[in-house]
Each structure stands twice: as C-alpha cells, then as structure tokens.
Image: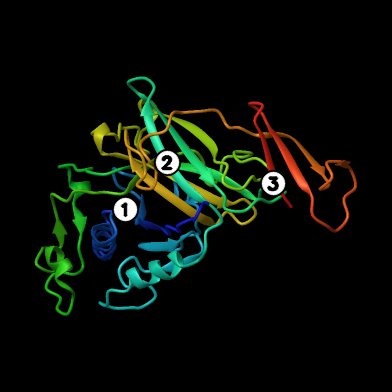
Amino acid sequence: HTLPKHRAVLEEYTGTWCGYYPRGFVGLEEMNRLHPDDFIGISYHNRDPMEIMSTSQYPNNVSGFPAAFLDRVTPVDAFSGNGSGKTWGIETAWELYCNIMAPAEVDVFSQWTEDSLLTATACVSFPVEREDCPYEVGFVLLSDGLKGTSGNWRQANYYTGESGWPSSMDEFVNGGSYVSGLTFNFVIIDRSGVSGIENSLQAPIVADLPQSVSYQFDIRQIRNTSGEKIVQDKNNLVVVALLFDKNTDSILNANKARVGQASSTAVGQPEVEPVRSVVKSELYDLNGHHVVHPRHGIYVRVNTLSDGTMIKSKV
C-alpha cells in the first residue's frame, strides 16, 4: 500500500541586491546538506540576472525582500524559521510541516526527448480511493550551479563583522559588503504554471493506482527577464513535481529529481506512459447484481480503465 511521505517545500524570494539575503542563501544550502533527499527549496530571484518573472507572477504575496513560505501557506524566515535573530530554526519549522499527512506519494523523473526538449513526468499514488479529485500536479524547473562575473552577480551583504552567528554564516560574517564568486542553487528558471495543471489528475481516485502527468520544458525558450539565456549547464537542472490542493493552491506534497534521474522513492526510472483514467465505474452487490441506486451496505466497485484493465474493490 502507498505510504505518502510529506516533503514540505520552502519557497524564498530574494535578489543579489538584498543585503539580508545571505541568511536565506545559507539556510537553503544547510537544509539541503542536512536533508539531501527530502528538502525542496525554490528560490525566486528579483532584479538580478536570475530573475525570470515579475513580482506580480509570484505564487505568494511578497511585500518585501527577503521573504519565504512553507508549502505556500506559512511565512517563515529561511534561516531562523518561526524564530528571529541569529538562531537556526528553519529546520524545525520545515519538519513540523513534513509531519502533516500528505494525501498522496509523488515521484518524478525526466528525460530528454530532443537535445533541448525535456519531458518531466510525475507519478502520483493515493493510499485511499475517493469519488472526487481535488488535486492537481504542477512542475518547476530549477538550476543549481549558476554563477557570473558581472557586478550584478555580487551578493550584497549586511552581515560583515557581526558576531553570534553559527559557523555556517562565516563566509558572509568574514566577507565584505559585497561577496563575489558565489554559486547559486535552487533557482527557479521555468514552471508549468503558477499552480497545478488543470485536469492533470482524474476522478475517481483508485487506491494504489498511480496516475501519470507529463509536461515538456523547451530549454531554448528559457530566458531571464532581460532576454538572456539562463541555462548554463544542463547537468545542473532539477525537476520538481508539486501536488496542489486545487481549491486553495497550497502545496500538499512534492518530490525532486536531477534531470536524467528519478526521485529517491522511485525504483529505477519508469517508462513514460499515458495516464490510465477511469472510463466506467459500476457497483454490484455481494450476489453479483448490478446496483444503480445503492443504499447503505457493502458493495463491489468495478472500475474500467482506459486501457481496458478492470479493478475491483470493496466499498
């Protein structure tokens, strides 16, 4: 049976011009070091070479920089979490969200269909069946390893000479008012949309029957807001699949995989298959009689899938 593992998503909003950003830079790096398989960080850049959208296109209402949110619900500090000052707290805040039960397990993988066309596929498995499907899947494409030498790649730094910070902040505490030569990771460079892809998951939900959703990224079309190419190394790309509550647009679960690999919970890399949707659902009583207007009691549901497979379950 499917046992979903909740991987909470930390989305931060920042820019190299923001002198308070270094604590978020360190926060995401430390979280990824501590939880390399499960931590999912997404960094939205503003007014620097990694900016790909305006603030009006952000999924959260950002009133100032830096800012961060867990699962698009709770505002947090990307270093101190729900705390303040120089205390490391984002790990505790993230773990509290991870302890919230997720409605489905999400796996993700990708493959190049052409030199510049990347197909990302999510497989979503629910542990229990339900008649409706208030969920959708969306995709985000991230890049690690981004760097540059021009002045607007320098990171403004307000922490120079400060005391009381953990050693993870040493690069900035010991640095000047600008820090050059940084490598930026977790940077969003493209997405399937603000939230989920409409009708990407189908009702009714059949327990333990994965539904597949695919989306294609065209690397040739990816530019920053200045029109410059932003992909520096295709080997540094990471695909994130997000499971959304389609009524609230909050994130319910997610998973990530480096391009060309599968997420950690996937066994190998599955073949890209079309979604098997339920095309007919019928109820029968325990004597095998077809039931059109069921009352309270135990019935056998027979779901016929689009590929002809029939799945029986007791309801």
**Residue underneath mark 3:** 313
**x then y, percent, for residue 81:** 36, 71
Question: How far is mark 3 from mark 2, CA to CA?
Answer: 27 Å
Residue 189 position by quadrant: top left
Callout 2: 10 Å neighbours few (<14), some, many (20+)? many
Residue 31 makes an appearance in the image: yes
**x then y, percent, for residue 217:** 42, 30
In the image shown, does 205 or 236 lie closer to the viewer? Answer: 205
SS at badge 2: strand
Residue 57 makes an appearance in the image: no
- Image vertical order of residue 219 relative to residue 146, above or below: above
In the image shown, does 74 or 163 lie closer to the viewer? Answer: 74
Question: How far is mark 3 from mark 1, CA to CA?
Answer: 34 Å
Question: How far is mark 2 from mark 1, CA to CA?
Answer: 13 Å
**Residue underneath mark 1:** 37
SS at badge 1: loop
Q: Which of the two discs, 3 and 1, labels the residue nearer the N terminus?
A: 1
* Badge 2 amino acid: Val
Count of numbered circles in the view: 3
**Residue plotted at (69% across, 46% down):** 313
Outermost residue, top side: 114
**Residue 307 appears left or right of 260:** right
**Residue 60 appears left or right of 148:** right
**Residue plotted at (24% across, 49% down):** 184
Q: Which of the two discs, 2 and 1, labels the residue nearer the N terminus?
A: 1
**Residue underneath mark 2:** 108
